[in-house]
Image (cartoon, rainbow, N blue to C red):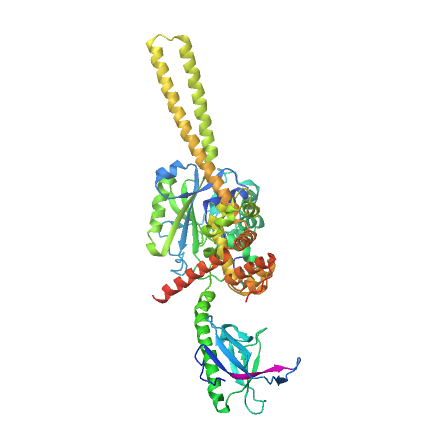
Amino acid sequence: MSSSGQGASEREAAFPAGRLFRVGGSNVVRADARLGVMTIRRAGDGGVQAWWRAADMAGDGELCGEYAGGDCAVERVRQAAGGRVHVLRPSRRTAGASHVFFWLQGAAGDDGAVIRSVDRVVAAGQGVRRLLAGLRGLREALPVRLGDVVTPEAVAPVLADARLAAALAGALPPGVAPAAAVRSPQFRQALAALSHVLEGGQAGAALAAQLGLDPRAGSSVVAFLRAIEQRRAAEDGDDQEMH
Amino acid sequence: MSNENGNWCLIESDPGVFTELIHNMGVSDVQVEELYSLDSETLRSLEPVYGLIFLFKWQGGSAAPPDSKTSGRSGALVDNGDVFFAQQIIQNACATQAILSILLNRAEDIELGETLTNFRSFAADFPPEMRGLALTNCDQIREVHNSFVRPESFLSDFDDEKRPAGEDDDLFHFISYVPVNGRLYELDGLKQGPVDHGASANWLEDVGAVIQQRMSEYSEGEIRFNLMALIGDRRKLLSEQISTVDADISRLMAMLDRLRLNDCTSPETSQEAQTVETQINSLNSERATLEHRVEIENDKFARYKLDNSLRKHNFIPFVYQLLNGMADKGILSPAIEKAQEKAADAHQSQQSL
């Protein structure tokens, strides 16, 4: 069986290991005696995956754990005698993310190197994650103006839809066409005021709640828009879970 | 929550707002016009002019309003029983107060309506400060004023924290100029009394110089000016002028008929008929010009009506429906991303400054 070092890189670490599983809903984990290979792998988007296969099988085996954004860490389980039981767990409490318990099956002297190789993959995942989050975070963190989202050009497809346009006309004073309203200075001012309300505090939460959205949707313009998007998608009836 | 504005909301300084404001207070046949020139020819073309409003706007954050005791060097402060003068108590009411300063001093020339007539008699014997207080407390006037609240205020239902006056807020000050009993007065609510700029046979000739003098006291960068005139209803005046022209045309047409009927051959008659025809043509042309001016006024009032209805409109349902529509069409995400790019670019260029 391959010892540590083989497959060790920043993207992947593969090593002999067996699994342990929780007993029922308890805190007790029991070892599965089978010999196998654990592969810890970093995906392109910075996520980390843990795969396990029985030693006599080919391929990757089964996916036992997945951590979005590489948000995970590997630790030795101190309560286990012998010091060879480890766990790959999420860094923060995240619903659905699992703990992957494994026991090292290679030469005991290689244990240190094996765990370092896993650390390298995990850390690299976090390095990418931070980079991506930094970029994404900046873009998500900068306040966005509603006026920049709801431009006359951007809403044109909605106004071109006769049914939607008729409904919109109903939300305007009599005799005002939606196309004219969207270009009016009063509408622009209303968008600016709405952006201000949405960028913080009780006022935004109250507004979101008034529209039947989660109060947190009122914490920023982007949060508000995403909430509307999500609710619309849910109302569509498509129940696809997105990974 | 500080109540220094005593429940008077900030309204826009716009001729359409002011025109409808005056009308909703019960005044007849008066409109407010924005002026871009102070020359007497322009002013005369708008007659009857009841008064002028001079608006100072300080760009937020810059120099504070000059001490009203020292500004306006010409003219003398007077304690004059002739003039209805009220001190300004509330900042947000200053536009309405400036308008009222003119209206209440032209009671003989204007149909004030019940509300303002009553207010004038009620406050007639009060000293200026009490008149100011009376105005502040006049519910009817305040309600009409507040009905023109700026569009973003409809969100004040949700706004627990009142937006503090910040760098973006402009400071306004309004001064009125009005002729009373042959003298030109300047009415500034922040002063102790009216300022007398002297006797004036034709105040429209003299007021230009007075205002220019005032403007010269400020440096260009710190301040912007707007000028508005309270004038007689244009369409009413124009329609009276059209009636007069029509009457003249009818008279001349009748004359023409008689001339043609009596003697078609004599050269004198023929000459006279031609003269009359020329006059009729000229009157028709004048009539067309007047009709055109009526159209301009109609268009302007239609625009005022539209703007005022949009000002008072709560756009939240419209925006919400629009956003849902964008989500349905799958165009909301791209629009968000575009806006985020824009914000990121702006952020970048700010960083590199």
Residue extent of the magenta highlight: A16-22
- Residue at 40 percent across and 24 percent down: it is B283
Percent across and percent down for residue A84 are 54, 88
Which SS does the magenta portion mostly show? strand
Image quadrant of residue B266? top left
- Residue at 56 percent across and 59 percent down: it is A228
Please identify the quadrant where the C terminus of chain B is shown: bottom left
Task: Give the number of callouts.
Answer: 0
Using the image, determine if residue A131 lies above or below residue B97: below
Q: Pick the residue in front: B35 or A5.
A: A5
Compared across the picture, whether B23 is left or right of B47 comes to right
Percent across and percent down for residue A140 are 47, 65
Q: Pick the residue in front: A200 or B157.
A: A200
Please identify the quadrant where the N terminus of chain B is shown: bottom right
Using the image, determine if residue A78 lies above or below residue B200: below
Percent across and percent down for residue B8 are 53, 54
